[in-house]
Image: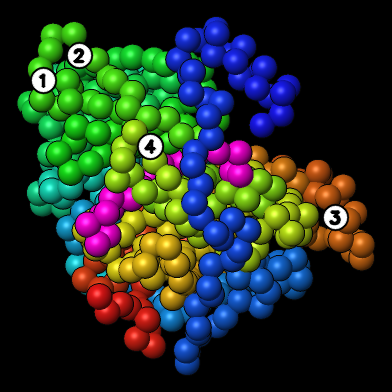
Amino acid sequence: MTAHRVHRVLAICALFAACTSWVHAAQDASVDLNVAVAPARCGPGSLPETGLQGQVPLQDRLNGRSRQGYRCNLELVGQYQGEGSGTISDVGGHCAYLSTSSAGRGKKKSPGVQVVDASNPSTPVLVRALATRAFELGTWESLKVNEAGTMLAGAGVGTLIGAGKLDLYDITDCAHPRLLNGADSGDSLPVTNVAHEGEWSPDGHTYWTSGLAGGTLSAIDVSNPAKPRNIYFGGSSIFVNHGMSFNADGTRMYLASIFPAGMVILDVSDIQYRKASNPRVKQIARITWQDGSTTQRAVPVTIQGRPYLIAIDEVGAQSLGGGIRFIDISDETNPIIVSHIRLAIQLKAHADVARLEGAGNGLFKYDAHYCAVDSKVNPTALACGYFQSGIRVFDIRNPLKPMEIAYFNPPAQTGKNAQLPGSDHAMSPAFGSILDNKISDPALLLLQASKSKQPDLTADWCSSAPKFVNGQLWATCNDNGFMILRFTNGAYPVSR
């Protein structure tokens, strides 16, 4: 860390008195710092990528090849596209719950969270939309199904107008959700929280939200879902908190940090056990890194008796090296990074290419966002949604040497912005367009790009976590909507 940056961080810490460990980088015992993960070997029936691992080449975007998509050992079984989906969607039972873009309000024919019945995997169908207070506004990264698969929650996310909004649904009958925290008006009751992200405690008794401004963190008691109540509301610093996850008993929170990139391990026993009238959240460890940016969240797993966090950086892979990292937390006071997953297109050597190719496709490039495992104990596979690199699946039996086994980057929906008002991607700022030009010098395409007002949709954004369901992958991407994918060529299941 440069002297200038140390001084800047210390100055911020002095102001907010909450980050004395920010200047201490994580221990890194990995040997793959700038190495691409071993690529998948594509079998018959695949339609492989034409460039680097994870890449949607500029030429493919310009000539229309990206509209066919790319697949390797995965194939499409069924799909419900609708009007596109928001940043995070989820599944419960035989249903999918698709959030929709807040930026598309007033344009969507079906506002709110879309309930899709996938009991027939080849023909998922929309059965209803949930347009209560929070769901209609937009839930960003807060729409989550609890571990038991019986409740769906989402907080309203939006500047000022989103604060205090929370919708809770009983999804025991997944195709017919029932509002639990209904008010006399027929809408949902307000609950104190400021949300960007949300997550359930493992026992389903607490729904947590985190906010950006002020590093806010809220714990909402849903033991009586008809009357949810805030039992903790705190803040640590400015523009810090992101996604969260928990250990098995819910006493440890693994909280991602946006600035600086990293993870915080928190003791949340007071809230989990309702032990105090004035509960405290205690920091156990904080680790940061400079080879990445905007850490999104972590997936806690145990492999061969050893606990790990699989932490995902949302931004910065191309310029900073970010990506996905495995963190050994056997000593929770001293976490150690042991390995990484980086696609070839994410290596620093290809940073300029990545920036150029994604110039017209919105803010996010070839970064991962959300991941899921096939089992929390001794998982064999990790499936991740990448913004422009699609759905990627990795063999993680040896966490020190993960290997890619399959991918599915869905067909680009180029030019269909108006048809996808529910897509956070289609409705996002463009940052330019690379289409409809005759410039032969790729370096000049960035100038042409600045004229566009909407993303060119030359690659989808797959920002939700794919879920392993009965040996299949259930995945949602912003433009293509909900998809059921089947493994081919014996890629999965992976032998233990």
Mark with earlier residue (1, 3): 1
- Which of discs 4 and 1 lies nearer the camera? The answer is 4
Q: Is residue 29 above or below residue 141?
A: below
Marks 1 and 3: which is nearer the front?
1
The C terminus, quarter of image: bottom left
**Horizontal and vertical percent position of residue 156:** 36, 28
**Residue found 59% across the figure and 56% down from its top:** 33
Q: How far is the residue under mark 3 from the one under mark 4?
A: 46 Å
Q: Can residue 446 be seen at all in this image of the molecule?
A: yes
Label at residue 274: 1
Q: Are marks 3 and 2 in contact (CB under 8 Å)?
A: no
Of discs 2 and 4, which sits in the foreground?
A: 4
Give the number of the mark in front: 3 or 2.
2
- Rate crowding at label 2 as few (under 14), some (14 to 19) or many (20 or more) other CA atoms within 10 Å: some
Q: Amino acid at mark 2?
A: Pro
The answer to whether 474 is drawn above or below residue 241 in the figure is below
Q: Which residue is mark 3?
A: 445
- Residue 195 at what x, y percent from top left? 38, 26
Res 9 → quadrant: top right
Residue annotated with mark 4 = 334
CA separation in Å, label 4 and label 1: 28 Å
- 10 Å crowding of disc 3: few (<14), some (14-19), many (20+): many
Between 467 and 21, the one lying in front of the other is 21
Q: The residue tagged with tag 1: helix, strand or loop?
A: loop
- Tell me the element at label 3: helix
Nearest the camera: 318 or 12? 12
- Image position, residue 131 (x, y; %): 31, 36
Spatial CA distance of label 2 from label 1 is: 8 Å
- Quickly name the residue at label 2: 279
Stretch of the chain drawn in magenta: 289-309
Report the mark closest to the observer, 3 or 4. 4
